[in-house]
């Protein structure tokens, strides 16, 4: 199937300035001054590595620890308001879920704007810091993965009745828009890697009409291991779900597929593994205890996981060329994904469809 299908490039390079345009970096000393001026918090700031904004851990000693986020200047205020409103909704609807809480500034504003030393108008947010270890830095057992699935299902239910004027925004990382990224194929290295990516795009194009008919609601859309904070000594294990920056109204199947894709192994031996979903099925098992999926959704999810791998390959290879100074962070998960795409390339479309239904 040809990929030259007349799709509008709604989330191609020109439509995602926060991913393609550089901005002036806010230093730690400036972050500390902003936090004190806006929130009355005095502490020591440490930078987190991030994709598009400036984010800091703010250690305020007796006051505790917080996260200060200073948005990319291109991020729309309506979309940032959507994220804050969603977190407030979850705080009211499901206070037991381990998500951060947001703070208003000293004047009562949810989204205060500052002019940084670089002369840019940028929106600040202060949220609670959730202690623990990001899952991408540790391991987990099958029951712990099931717990991850349970929390994902509970988040889905808690978001089901939420709406916001900006919830239908276009998010480049939402696999629904994969075919809008075909103009980034030239950034994929020639040879096997590009061939595997093209095949993933072709297969996704075949199932896209079915995806368009799937149930939709507002969802987290980025349940990856760097956004899951865990504590092996805590009976609940999962102590934090962070980063609602990619939340959007999308297909329920997309949200699940992203969570499953992110449980795929970092190293993959084609000769000694049955398939990529060995660990991911534990997450699905926990999810299905609290939320149902239709047979059609279960057949589509493996294709959507494959599609998310293609999204990651396209966006990260493109952005690594634009921002070579940040390429280590941008490409941190891309290398593992090539083996995953190769595995999908090696099996039939029918086998992919049956991965979660057999």
Image (spheres, rainbow, N blue to C red):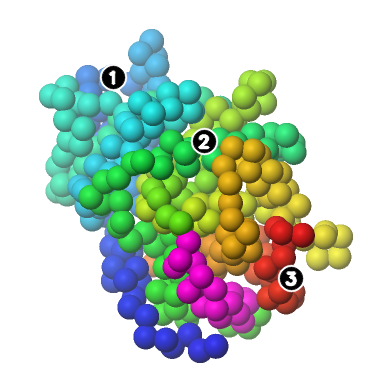
- Measured as percent of width and height from the top left, residue 316 is found at 48, 64
The label nearer to you, 1 versus 2, is 2
Sequence-first tag of 1 and 2? 1
The residue at which mark 1 appears reads as: 42
| Left or right relative to 183: residue 71 | left
Sequence-first tag of 1 and 3? 1
- Measured as percent of width and height from the top left, residue 224 is found at 55, 47
Q: Residue at x 51, y 78 (%)?
A: 205
- CA gap between label 1 and label 2 equals 35 Å
Residue 353 lies within the magenta run: no
- For residue 78, say whether it is visible: yes
- CA gap between label 1 and label 3 equals 56 Å
Q: Main secondary structure of the magenta part?
A: helix
Q: Which numbered marker is on residue 154?
A: 2
As helix, strand or loop, the secondary structure at mark 3 comes to: helix
| Total number of numbered discs in the rendering | 3
The residue at which mark 3 appears reads as: 351
Which region is colored magenta?
A: 193-214
Q: Residue at x 71, y 49 (%)?
A: 281
Labelled pair 2, 3 in contact (Cβ < 8 Å): no
For label 3, the crowd category at 10 Å Cα-Cα, with few meaning under 14, some 14 to 19 and many 20 or more, is few
Q: Which of these two is toward me, 271 or 33? A: 271
Q: Which of these two is toward me, 38 or 353? A: 353
């Amino acid at each position: 199937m040809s990929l030259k299908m007349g799709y509008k490039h709604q989330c191609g390079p020109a439509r995602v300035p926060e991913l393609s345009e550089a901005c002036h970096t806010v230093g730690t000393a400036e972050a500390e001054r902003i936090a004190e001026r806006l929130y009355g918090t005095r502490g020591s700031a440490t930078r987190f590595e991030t994709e598009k904004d400036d984010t800091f851990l703010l250690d305020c000693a007796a006051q505790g620890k917080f996260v200060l986020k200073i948005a990319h200047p291109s991020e729309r205020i309506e979309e940032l308001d959507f994220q804050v409103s969603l977190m407030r909704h979850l705080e009211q609807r499901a206070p037991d879920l381990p998500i951060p809480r947001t703070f208003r500034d000293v004047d009562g504003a949810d989204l205060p704007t500052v002019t940084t030393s670089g002369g840019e108008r940028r929106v600040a947010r202060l949220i609670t810091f959730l202690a623990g270890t990001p899952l991408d830095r540790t391991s987990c057992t099958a029951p712990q993965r099931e717990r991850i699935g349970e929390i994902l299902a509970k988040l889905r239910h808690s978001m089901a009745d939420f709406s916001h004027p900006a919830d239908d925004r276009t998010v480049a990382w939402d696999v629904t828009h994969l075919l809008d990224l075909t103009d980034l194929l030239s950034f994929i290295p020639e040879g096997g890697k590009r061939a595997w990516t093209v095949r993933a795009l072709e297969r996704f194009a075949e199932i896209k009409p079915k995806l368009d008919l799937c149930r939709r609601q507002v969802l987290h859309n980025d349940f990856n291991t760097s956004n899951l904070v865990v504590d092996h000594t805590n009976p609940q294990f999962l102590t934090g779900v962070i980063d609602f920056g990619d939340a959007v109204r999308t297909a329920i199947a997309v949200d699940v597929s992203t969570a499953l894709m992110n449980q795929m192994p970092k190293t993959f031996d084609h000769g000694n593994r049955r398939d990529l979903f060995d660990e991911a099925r534990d997450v699905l098992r926990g999810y299905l205890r609290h939320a149902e999926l239709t047979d059609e959704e279960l057949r589509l999810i493996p294709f959507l996981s494959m599609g998310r791998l293609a999204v990651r390959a396209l966006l990260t290879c493109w952005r690594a060329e634009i921002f070579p100074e940040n390429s280590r962070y941008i490409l941190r998960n891309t290398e593992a994904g090539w083996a995953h795409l190769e595995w999908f390339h090696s099996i039939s479309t029918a086998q992919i469809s049956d991965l979660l239904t057999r």
